[in-house]
Image: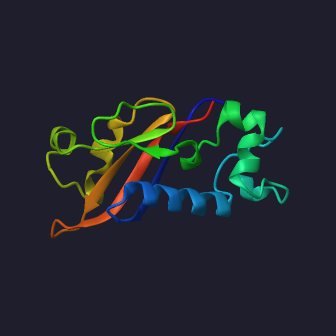
Amino acid sequence: MGASGWNYFTAYQPDAQAALDELRRQVFEAGDYWWAVPGGFGSSAADFPDRPRSEEELWADERVQESGTHSILDMTWVLADGEEPDFGTLAPVTEAEALARAGVARPTRAHVQALAPLAEQRWFGRYAVLHDDAGAPSELYFWGFSGD
């Protein structure tokens, strides 16, 4: 199947891990992910009434362990400053990266396209604090590629 790109906007909160945890909960509950079932290509888990009812049940399936969900569910941890990227982690966009890619230290939604190339590795994502026109944090933007 190959990797899939995904992206999500959430309301800003200073605790990016808490934002990720809430986003994962919402995506799982909505069934807005790919579930590795035979013949399930091109559909989401929401299309299957018998889909797993807990993340524990979802990840117990060997097919899911091998193929992932092609969604934010494949990401589990927000890295702290200085931590090295690893499988299933999300790294923050630094001010230097935002300046280099978007030409601003406080990116907005208008800069998302410029930031997109920062997530190049499969099974590793990025997140950026997006700002409103006054320069105040307004959203978190999560994006990356996952799934096989």
What residue do we see at 47% from left, 55% from top?
Answer: 20
Compare residues 13 and 110 and report the one nearer the observer: 13
Q: Is residue 133 left or right of residue 126?
A: left
Above or below — where is 142 with respect to 137?
Answer: above
The percent coordinates of residue 28 (x first, y second) are 64, 57
Left or right: 54, with 83 as reference point:
right
Q: Position of residue 54 (x, y in %)?
A: 73, 56
The one nearer the camera, 10 or 18, is 18
- Place of residue 140 in the rendered image (x, y in percent of width and height, measured from the top left): 36, 58
Q: Residue at x 28, y 41 (%)?
A: 81
x and y percentages locating residue 48 in the rendered image: 81, 55
> Which residue is rendered at x = 32% and y = 46% of the image?
113
Q: Quadrant of the C terminus?
A: top right
Q: What number of labels is visible?
A: 0
- Farthest-out residue, bottom: 134
Seen from the viewer's position, the closer of residues 7 and 80 is 80
